[in-house]
């Protein structure tokens, strides 16, 4: 889960990583009186906020009020700004880049650092980027920071601050169960201090059982997605018109792919998971119906989840929600025959193969 | 030895008295798997289905000479259970559990590698060698003994493809789920080596998905090392770019990870990529 | 370094290991009013304090005062009691044993636990002792505690407390750089709680640079040994009459061995170390002279420590301290000839081999 | 290859600009050791004794293809330096430094074992193969090329015994100090294997001391595996029992660790034990 900059900076502060003094507001009335030249930063999860006008500078109280009022409630690339972070402006001498990220292929953290910060790291030439794998059984050791500092040609005093920062950054990565901790830019100030001017932190949501102190609503989820999450479904809203219910993330994704290849646009991703419970199916329909699709496709490969259970769930949902929209069901695998008989008895069309069901649902959705 | 397991593989189940553990242990026994013991702390001395002895710890289960374990405990306890199995020196550690924090998995995988132990999963369907051994949660009835080996990053989708292969009249020499988590024990390359060395396997199917560079690395490996026919299917073509690993991910995996990148890599390695799961058997000549 | 029980318990308390309520006093005037039945425990570093009369029980205020007054200042097997620990008496239902210790041969920590506590663990039959190596790169994991609990046949509730205690005990072992953390007895109380009734903690003195908060004077060292430690020498007082200065721990120990085999008893162990500095030699003489030996043996194999430097140091010490006691010097190795010439010029006898010097010093010490 | 090192061994020195590091690096060069680079963070680009390049990190030194490193940095920094060398994959990591916390050494030794790397020390004199290579702090002038291999837990005492061997007219094939700390990288058994495999070595001397059970394990190993003549010396016979590891130590090492126990074990293995260091050459037949 992606954290807002201000949340990441709060974690940094607790872990001894220097960040600018600042505070967050949700309304201009929460502004404190102007003291120092400040930066007003929209809290949205997008790269290139500055270029999109999401960051403003204030050299006076009037500036500050204007910037906060203008940003709060504004839309940046479709995202509404609900919070802004007010921070002391830094006296920037140089901008560096540093991050620790999971490398899926190596199954270990990788330190990435560059003397060229403040720009997208993808745009920095490979030979200006230092990368080093970190063994998770050993953790971070100072030699890694020495190698990085030498690569980046940091002067000794900044190098010392940088190595101390890396110790803390690795602690954040491990202790907060992160997929990514990124500081870009990491600023060298005119006063000779190293300060994290930005903070990008992605936490592993599977780790939240050990971070019970953290109550975070994933800022990237829609209200319907949050509702689904609360009910334990993997659910993603998309911009098409065919509602989808399937079982297994891979099969669900394959269903969306097949729809798309048939010029049918899915309205959502919904993975029923491996349960064998009528209520779970009914609840899934509730979610999909709230997304208001033109037609609904159910694609089940029965295993742990048995086809007759799903069929009973579909019938129950149809009755409960008085569903009039076209529904196309594919049932295959365990208790397939029983399931299809139940559907037939209730006037719901079903198919034994995915392809037939896909073709059919695309067709019926087009006439809606 | 077939691929990883065979008819002599003795399996224990950590968490055999849990909801998932007991159901799948029962299915495995029906399949013919030699389930020699179950672990359930505090319940040692009882039996599972009146046959399989239940003991308190993996150490206690070692008298049954297990070669493999299935871990089916709640996510917060998986790391400890895996360390217990690795400490006991069990050669194959399959983790059924989903939602294991990947930091835990990183440590498990590194520790297993240090001790020469294979980790399957977490969050994968396990391994099946038809007629010999099943460890995991794949439905028993979809398999037929044959010469097609399947490796997949997915669960249900694997069954879909395996069933399509079986329906087409072919059969499987081995089916392995790598697991759907960001960090898992096996890569396609690990499994390809096993498939290549298995005399029974004549054809190979890889079921990949977006994210990571596992498929791209596999494609390069196939080009250089595999003479057997390989067919692939990639899911996630239609997924919006939405969830990404931030900028750093792109640097680590050098711009790969999209469906396009994976399909291109496979095509360049002479691997045909099916548009739909059901097309896989058609591409297997 | 061996810690007193009360120090160990303070560390336990900070790390969440339950210990009885209590306090330490150095004089009976520091006694608090009697509240509950109490144990009064002499703080000395000896096993079997109870048997030696070092532990008393108090059921009244009068008992308490009598016990504290009696123990403070008393001698137990040659050690003077300077501190006593007053603790609430426990309602003991059962006594267990647990420790984590360094295994030198395996180079890793070993957990040792037994259902039979309260007695010397050496006296417990091997088949009643649970041992398990702990991989230092992984640390403690709960399955170890589960195995131990099953071995010890602990009931589930006590087993749970025990496993939680092991987490904390391993943290103490690692975070305090211990060679040994031992709880014997670990008491199961009538109320069903697990409490550490004793604490034996041995810390690695080489780790003290990262435990700067801990200021501990090694309770097992004599004042002269503490003085030597402060000056950076490895110095141990012994009960013989021949003062010894040598270089290298092995050579120094071999010198003591050879003296002993020749019926000469060493007064001390002093390892000059690998330095090449006249002042270090003079300072060493100062320490040895304070131990008041009958004769002094210097045994040097010159390498990093050069023989002429040592010779100059001996001469300087002889003059500075007006040494009249017989001195026998063995010099061999780098700059041997120069060194022996310097000694000869100053009337100090020297030999090229260890055996000659040993024989000679034993002989001259006998006539003193 | 002789024992661990030979004339082709390329050595780097971590901490070459320190007091100890520079002195001993100089002596090693005089001995004939190929010192290919020194490490001193921040001093990269300069030279040691106008010849040996100094670089900022072990990574930077890898262009000189080193096989071994000598670590001579202050105790608090040893773990990091050792991890740096292990990370770079240098096969022999010799730690000169004394007073390294043994918890650090435990981790170093386990990590090195995981990566197949040999750790010598800490707090030992290093290794010398006369005429070929010296890494460490043994005095250059005490050696003569010969067929006696010496392994010792001590420093100065080793020199005493080596010099006695040399004076007696014999010479050494290799001399190794294991290190005097509670936890060190090598055991007598590790070294005995090397001595046994070395065709040049005909006779073996072990210099042990009280504490631990390294000597007892070695004695059992010798009895079972070593045909070459072995002679031992044990120091600490006269040491008062004073410093012990507490009761737990006795359990772990099963009552061994005293000089008597070690001498008895050696005698039972047919290993003669010298009363005085100077007697060692007399016992070498």
Image (tube, coloured by chain):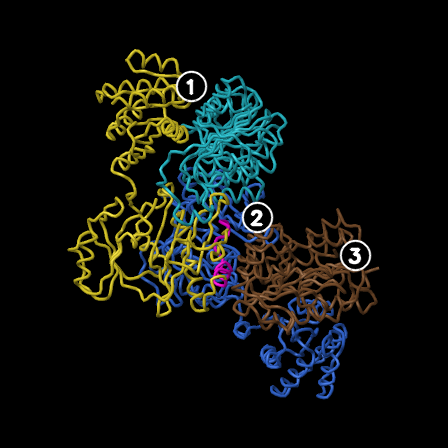
Chain colours: A yellow, B cyan, C blue, D brown
Residue B61 relative to residue C239: left or right: left
Q: Name the residue under label 2.
A: C123
Quarter of the image where the C terminus of chain C is located: bottom right
The alpha-carbon separation of the residues under discs 3 and 2 comes to 45 Å
Query: Relative to D174, does residue B176 appear above or below in the rendering?
Result: above
Residue stretch in magenta: A135-150
- Tag 1's secondary structure? strand
At mark 3, the secondary structure is loop
Identify the subunit bearing mark 2. Answer: C
Pinpoint residue C352: horizontal percent, then vertical percent.
Answer: 76, 76
Residue B110 percent location from the top left of the image: 52, 45
In the image, residue C285 lies in the stretch drawn in magenta: no
The circle on residue B128 is: none
| Residue C176 drawn at (x, y percent) | 47, 58
Q: Are marks 3 and 1 on the same chain?
A: no
State whether residue A274 appears in this view.
Answer: no
Numbered badge on residue A333: 1
Separation of residues labelled 3 and 1 (CA atoms): 71 Å
Q: Name the residue under label 3.
A: D201
Comparing C36 with D139, the one in front is: D139
Crowding near pointer 2: few (<14 within 10 Å), some, many (20+)?
few
Q: The disc numbered 1 marks a residue on which chain? A: A
Q: Residue at x 43, y 55 (%)?
A: A124
Q: Nearer the viewer, residue A180 or C152?
A: A180
């Amino acid at each position: 889960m992606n954290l807002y900059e201000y949340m990441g900076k709060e974690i940094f502060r607790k872990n001894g990583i220097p960040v600018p003094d600042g505070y967050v507001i949700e309304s201009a009335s929460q502004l404190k009186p102007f003291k120092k030249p400040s930066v007003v930063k929209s809290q949205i999860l997008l790269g290139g906020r500055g270029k999109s006008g999401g960051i403003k500078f204030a050299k006076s109280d009037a500036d500050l009020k204007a910037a906060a009022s203008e940003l709060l409630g504004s839309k940046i690339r479709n995202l509404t700004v609900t919070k802004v972070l007010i921070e002391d402006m830094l006296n920037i001498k140089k901008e560096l880049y540093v991050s620790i990220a999971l490398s899926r292929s190596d199954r270990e953290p990788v330190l990435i650092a560059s003397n060229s910060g403040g720009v997208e790291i993808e745009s920095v030439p490979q030979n200006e980027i230092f990368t080093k794998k970190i063994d998770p059984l050993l953790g971070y050791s100072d030699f890694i920071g020495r190698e990085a500092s030498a690569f980046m040609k940091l002067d000794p005093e900044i190098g010392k601050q940088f190595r101390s920062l890396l110790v803390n950054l690795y602690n954040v990565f491990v202790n907060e169960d992160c997929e990514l901790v990124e500081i870009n830019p990491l600023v060298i100030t005119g006063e000779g201090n190293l300060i994290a001017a930005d903070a990008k932190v992605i936490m592993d949501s599977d780790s939240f059982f050990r971070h019970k102190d953290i109550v975070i609503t994933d800022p990237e989820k829609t209200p319907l997605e949050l509702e689904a999450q609360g009910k334990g479904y993997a659910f993603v809203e998309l911009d098409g018109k065919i509602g989808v219910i399937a079982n297994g993330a891979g099969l669900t994704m394959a269903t969306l792919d097949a729809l798309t290849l048939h010029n049918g646009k899915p309205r959502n991703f919904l993975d029923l998971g491996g349960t064998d419970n009528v209520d779970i199916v009914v609840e899934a329909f509730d979610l999909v119906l709230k997304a208001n699709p033109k037609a609904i496709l159910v694609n089940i490969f029965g295993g742990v989840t048995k086809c007759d259970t799903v069929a009973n769930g579909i019938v129950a949902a149809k009755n409960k929600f008085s569903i009039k929209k076209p529904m196309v069901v594919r049932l295959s695998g365990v208790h397939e025959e029983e399931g299809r008989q139940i559907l037939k008895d209730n006037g719901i069309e079903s198919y034994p193969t995915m392809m037939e069901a896909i073709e059919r649902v695309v067709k019926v959705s087009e006439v809606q | 030895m077939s691929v990883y397991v065979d008819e002599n593989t003795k399996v224990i189940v950590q968490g055999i008295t849990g909801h998932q553990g007991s159901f799948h242990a029962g299915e495995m026994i029906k399949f013919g798997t030699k389930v020699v013991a179950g672990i359930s702390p505090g319940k040692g001395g009882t039996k599972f289905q009146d046959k399989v002895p239940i003991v308190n710890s993996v150490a206690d289960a070692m008298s049954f000479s297990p070669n493999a374990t299935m871990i089916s405990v709640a996510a917060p306890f998986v790391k400890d259970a895996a360390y217990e199995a690795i400490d006991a020196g069990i050669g194959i550690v399959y983790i059924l559990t989903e939602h294991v924090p990947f930091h835990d998995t990183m440590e498990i995988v590194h520790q297993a590698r240090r001790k020469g132990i294979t980790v399957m999963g977490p969050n994968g369907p396990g391994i099946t060698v038809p007629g010999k051994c099943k460890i995991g949660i794949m439905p028993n009835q979809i398999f037929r003994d044959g010469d097609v080996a399947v490796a997949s990053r997915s669960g249900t989708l694997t069954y879909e493809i395996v069933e399509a292969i079986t329906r087409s009249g072919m059969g499987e020499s081995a089916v392995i789920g790598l697991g759907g988590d960001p960090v898992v024990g096996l890569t396609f390359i690990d499994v390809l080596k096993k498939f290549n060395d298995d005399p029974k396997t004549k054809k190979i199917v890889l079921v990949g998905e977006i994210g990571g560079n596992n498929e791209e690395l596999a494609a390069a490996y196939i080009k250089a090392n595999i003479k057997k026919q390989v067919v692939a299917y990639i899911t996630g073509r239609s997924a919006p770019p939405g969830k990404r690993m931030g900028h750093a991910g792109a640097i680590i995996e050098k711009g790969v990870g999209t469906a396009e990148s994976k399909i291109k890599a496979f095509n360049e390695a002479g691997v045909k990529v099916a548009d739909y799961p059901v097309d896989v058997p058609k591409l297997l000549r």
